[in-house]
Amino acid sequence: MKRMLLGSIAATALLSGLNSSPSFAQVRIEEIVVTARKTEERLQDIPLSITAFTSAELEERGMKDVYEISNFTSSFTFERLNRYGVQGGTSRPVIRGQSNILGESNAAVFVDGLLMSDSILSFPFDIVERVEIIKGPQAALFGRATFAGAINLITKKGSNDFQNRISVRAAEDDDYEVNLLSRGPIIEDKAFYMIHGRYYDFGGQYKDASGGQPVGAEESAGIDGSLEFRLGDSFTANFAAGYGKDNDSLSPNSLQNRFANNCFLDVARQYYCGKVQPGLVDYNIELLQGKDGLDKESYRVTGQLQWDVGGFTITSNSGYFYADNAFGTDADFSGVNTSGGSNNRLVLSTRKEWSTELRIQSPAQEKFRYLAGAYYYKRRLPLISTRLDGGASTDSGTDRVNNWALFASLAADFTDGLTGTVELRYAKDKIGNNNPTARPTTNTLIERSFKSWSPRFTLDWQVYPDSKVYATAAKGNKPGVINADPRLPDSIRFADEESSWNYEIGTKNTLMDGRLLINAAGYYIDWSKQQLTTNFFFDTTGTTVSYLVNAGTTRIYGLEFEMTAVANEYLSTGFNYSLNDAKFTDFIDSEHGQLFGDPQAAGKSTPNSSKHQFSLFGRLNYPMANETVAFLRADFSYKERKYAQIYNLAHTGDQKLLNLKVGVERDDWNVTLFLDNVFDDRTPSTAVRFVDFANILPIGTSQRTSSVVRGFQVPLARKRQFGVTANYSF
């Protein structure tokens, strides 16, 4: 790691030394405009820590989903177990060490500013104009579920310039993708269209040990489109819609069984210490009766309206997302028919969510500016887990969320360079569960309301025309949660909302006439009322069930650094690094007491988060005839180990990922050969504490109180892969 840091410093020095190059003054780093504060601002002007990728950069790097973006973004990690999602079909991004084990994620994904809580991994990136990873709590302006940050995908729209584009990809492991995009004017300056179609097929890189069938195969098809209308200079309307169909085989997950356990062998379920060891994929696929893997249909419909009235801007943004999922899996990850096949399940869910926002903004050029708005969000999610051996199904009822909010932002220029901003959101969440099956006579619907205030205070100083420093203090808010199991007593039915105070100082600098960017931020997070899991013991049956309580507090110290530089038309490079020191300061856990003799887990790091991350890239260009350029590009990333649980015993190991590309490009076409994961690094994206149902260990005379022993679920990483991409615009 030290060598990589020294290499980055040397690269910066090299770029500084190239200032005398004759072509140096002809190149600059592309300026990126973001909408992280509900208005268009240059990335280097906004006093927030944001990593942004344009569509051109996504294409050049070969990034196809949010997981691949996380590999090259500081303070950002992402679990990839399958394209269904982690728990309940949701994605689970982790920003700045604020991870969780159960419940909703601490960071949320938005599409064109609208919350999309379903798994995002199959979203077509060919229609994405820009991705913004906004770090730190964004509750003041983005709302619920942005406790640690937000990931905002902005889609492509029509324009006055016609563009017809075909993109193809072919790689090892039967990996093929075709994207067709067309956009342009219907009536010049007044009406525009965009339409996109995609087909993707991946054969998988692993096989099931018992039956020999391929696992990890993925197939997607979809169509997206938009229409935009402009009535003069004062009114704009944009309507978009999309349909997607996913059909995946079982994901390549392996179970590290109990025979690998090497520590705490006399406690209730034993444990494993060290780097988990990915093994064979071993499912009992026959018991799934042809319903294995993911079968998903999804729809989205959105509409944005914008009026400009006397310098004021009124914006309406509304959308509907729908996802129908059927996910069949061997839940014990074992080819053995355990419990009569009861662990072979089909999970059915239908996620429906609506959101709408209305806001008004004063003229941006005034010394005193304001924004105010109202927001409404609604989600319904029925979830049924069906046993495929004829056993009883588990009806988890319909989770219900209703959220209302009012928000405002006030900004004032105290001097030409000093600006202060106050943002505030008041929100009311009504969270419930409707389950006539489990509660047929009383308490069919159980629900509770949560109210919160989420402020953010910002002070930024433009020290020089291209250098600024800023400081922020923001309160993060995560919605409360319901423990819907009807057997639980009412006293533990709900867990309260989480809260945090986040303090950040940072600087953004554009140097060498726009050819060198250096940004840095340091922060401290005081996190309280953490929603963590514990067990409830039923005296009558002797069984237990997990539920969420407000049991923990955490403190996080962090540092982020980003540098991008363009030496000349031949050479560009970049580097980013993050330190996230996230540790519990108070968390009482019964299993921690069994392992260590003390239930207090203070001092342990949060799971599923890397303490150290860094990535760097370099690109060499070689100009050729007819405005054609040959290029060579390398992208390297490092992620330190992620722990499976709060005990900091089992972990993923360190990931070292290198991608290489060589190609030829012109304005209207390009061809690229790529070699991803050059080192064939097999580090999993996560490690999940599990149990080994297939290998029961008799209790005997030891101190153990359970015959079901710990195992660890390990998703297998993508192997090294060679392929080619080609794009042609006409």
Image: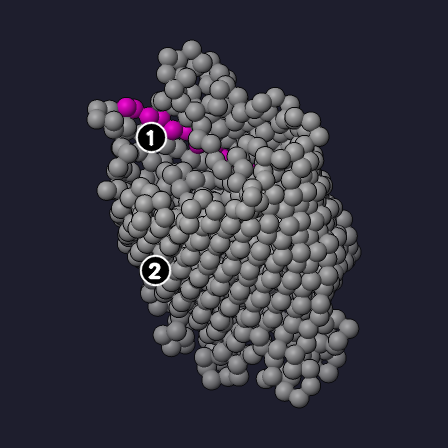
Confirm whether residue 140 shows in the render.
no
Task: Rate crowding at label 1 as few (under 14), some (14 to 19) or many (20 or more) other CA atoms within 10 Å.
Answer: some
Which span is picked out in magenta? Answer: 613-623
Q: Earlier in the sequence, mark 1 or mark 2?
A: 2
Q: Position of residue 445 (x, y in %)?
A: 65, 79
Q: Quadrant of residue 288?
A: bottom left
Gap in angstroms between the C-alphas marked 1 and 2: 32 Å
Where the N terminus falls, by quadrant?
A: top right
Depicted 350 relative to depicted 204: above or below? below
Q: Dot 1 corresponds to which residue?
A: 632
Residue depicted at 41% across the width and 76% down the height:
287
Q: Position of residue 631 (x, y in %)?
A: 31, 29
Task: Name the residue nearer the viewer: 625 or 5.
Answer: 625
Q: Quadrant of residue 712?
A: bottom right
Task: Name the residue nearer the viewer: 533 or 414.
Answer: 414
By secondary structure, the bulk of the magenta-drawn segment is best described as strand
